Image (spheres, rainbow, N blue to C red):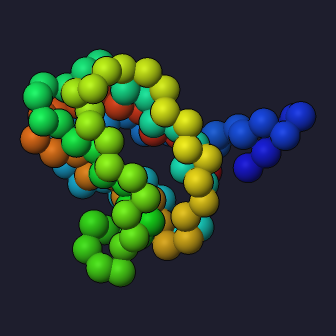
């Protein structure tokens, strides 16, 4: 979704703080940003899928090392089937924005 002056504006967000599979949205939308609020332990990963689960027919959008550092990762990538986030190994503290 575009806001004033062509900027992305998120209409939804989710904070994830455990190792889990989280379906954030079903149907089409846009992944806005992933904010790593605090660095996870060694080996932590965040995997983003276009789908309503991590199983087929989901398409992987990105895999991020959640122990690499904190900050905002801008994506602004459309998805068609849904938005699913899988966090594993070391529990992160992340916030995901999306439409």
- Residue 28 visible, this angle: yes
Residue at (12% x, 36% y) in the render: 43
* Residue drawn at x 54%, y 50% as measured from the top left: 31
Q: Residue furthest bottom?
A: 57
Residue at the location (32% across, 49% down)? 63
Q: Position of residue 65 (x, y in %)?
A: 26, 37
- Residue 70 in the image: state x and y as whole percent: 36, 20
* Residue 7 relative to residue 55: left or right: right
The answer to whether residue 26 is seen in the rendering is no
Q: Give the total of numbered labels.
A: 0
The residue sitting at the right extreme is 5
- Residue at 59% x, 67% y: name it: 28
The picture quadrant where one finds residue 32 is: top right
Q: Position of residue 23 (x, y in %)?
A: 36, 58
Left or right relative to 49: residue 87? left
Quarter where residue 79 is shown: bottom right
Residue 97 percent location from the top left of the image: 53, 40
Query: Which corner quadrant of the image does residue 95 belong to?
Result: top left
Q: In the rendered view, would you say 14 is above or below 37? A: below
Residue 31 is left or right of residue 42, and the answer is: right
- In the displayed structure, 23 sits above or below 90; it is below
In the rendered image of this protein, does residue 94 appear above or below residue 10? above
Q: Nearer the viewer, residue 65 or 15?
A: 65
Q: Is residue 58 left or right of residue 79?
A: left
């Amino acid at each position: 979704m575009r806001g004033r002056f062509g900027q992305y504006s998120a209409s939804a967000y989710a904070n994830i703080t455990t190792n889990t599979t989280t379906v954030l949205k079903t149907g089409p939308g846009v992944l806005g940003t992933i904010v790593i609020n605090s660095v996870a332990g060694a080996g932590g990963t965040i995997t983003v899928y276009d789908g309503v689960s991590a199983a087929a027919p989901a398409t992987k959008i990105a895999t991020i090392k959640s122990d690499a550092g904190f900050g905002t990762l801008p994506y602004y990538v459309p998805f068609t089937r849904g938005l699913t986030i899988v966090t594993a190994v070391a529990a992160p503290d992340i916030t995901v924005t999306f439409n």
